[in-house]
Amino acid sequence: MLSTDVGLNRRTLLQGAAAIAGLTALSSSAAASATWGGEPHQSPIRITPGHTEPAHLPTIHVHYPHDATVTMTYVREDADDPDGCTVRGHEETVRAELPPGAASLTVGGVTYGLAQFHWHTPSEHRLAARDYPIEMHFVHQDDTGHTLVVGVWVRPGRANQTLGRLYDHLVSECAAADPVGHIDIGALLPRRHASYRYDGSLTTAPYTEGVQWVMLTEPITASPRQIELLRTMFPTGNRRDVQDITDRTVLSDRGPL
């Protein structure tokens, strides 16, 4: 199980009751920024553990199948470029798409369906001064269109069998989508689920705000070969630069309520 949170910032006085509930306050604070012309709440950010606020955070219940079929697709951002099939943009990626209802998580009585997960190299979020070679994003939406992203850092180490199976099907730009069966999505999460939480945005255009971020503190591992496969596909990287944290507070998980 994962845990989720409240997004505390200077507007918390207007959100006290919702903050207790957890996820609701995170959405509210992000919406307030857009509605009231507040400071931008963009992602990714640099997370400095000593500057986070410890909190007892409500629990997220993850429902990821151990035998799923995903469709590997290349996400293009240069369809109008004659050389687009050979040029790698920093906002492009390969993602694994799931059919509706195949995987989800629940928090505070709200269910968020897992729509897709994808990879960035190097990592987009920084942990203090540290970069990881890969960062995975599990992108969820609820029935009202609110987005929650679970981020997982990947460090060099033992091979991840599920990651290896997916990376055997990394599709090149302009190639056809490739269905891959028997994927254990849960094996892409670490065993421990302590996390950092904050409200932010998409990391690719249009950089929409109101995104709830849950960055797991413990990375998973991938073999050097697995890491190199993604780096070879994106030799100049496919991450967005770190954004200013502005008026936000990053919460660190002190354990469930």
Image: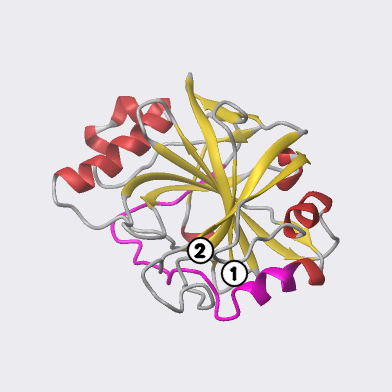
Residue 41 on image: x %, y %:
31, 55
Magenta residues, dominant SS class: loop
Q: In this image, 53 relative to 1: left or right?
A: left
Answer whether residue 236 is magenta in the image. Answer: yes
Q: Quadrant of residue 142?
A: top left
Q: Are marks 2 and 1 in contact (CB under 8 Å)?
A: no
What kind of residue is marked 1? Thr
Q: Residue at x 41, y 39 (%)?
A: 147
What kind of residue is marked 2? Thr
Can you say which quadrant of the picture contains the N terminus?
A: top right
Q: Nearer the viewer, residue 249 or 67?
A: 67
Q: In this image, 113 relative to 80: left or right?
A: right
Residue 256 on image: x %, y %:
59, 30
Q: Earlier in the sequence, mark 2 or mark 1?
A: 2
Q: Nearer the viewer, residue 26 or 42?
A: 42
Q: Residue at x 52, y 70 (%)?
A: 238
Q: Which mark is residue 33?
A: none
Q: Residue at x 60, y 80 (%)?
A: 235
Answer whether residue 60 is magenta in the image. Answer: no
Q: Which mark is residue 121?
A: 1
Q: Secondary structure at mark 2?
A: loop
Crowding near the residue tagged with mark 1, few <14, some 14–19, many ≥20 C-alpha atoms within 10 Å:
many
Residue corresponding to mark 2: 48
Q: Nearer the viewer, residue 108 or 14?
A: 108
Q: Secondary structure at mark 1?
A: loop
Q: How is the image coloured?
A: secondary structure
Please state which of the two labelled residues, at mark 2 or mark 1, is closer to the viewer: 1
The residues colored magenta run 227-253
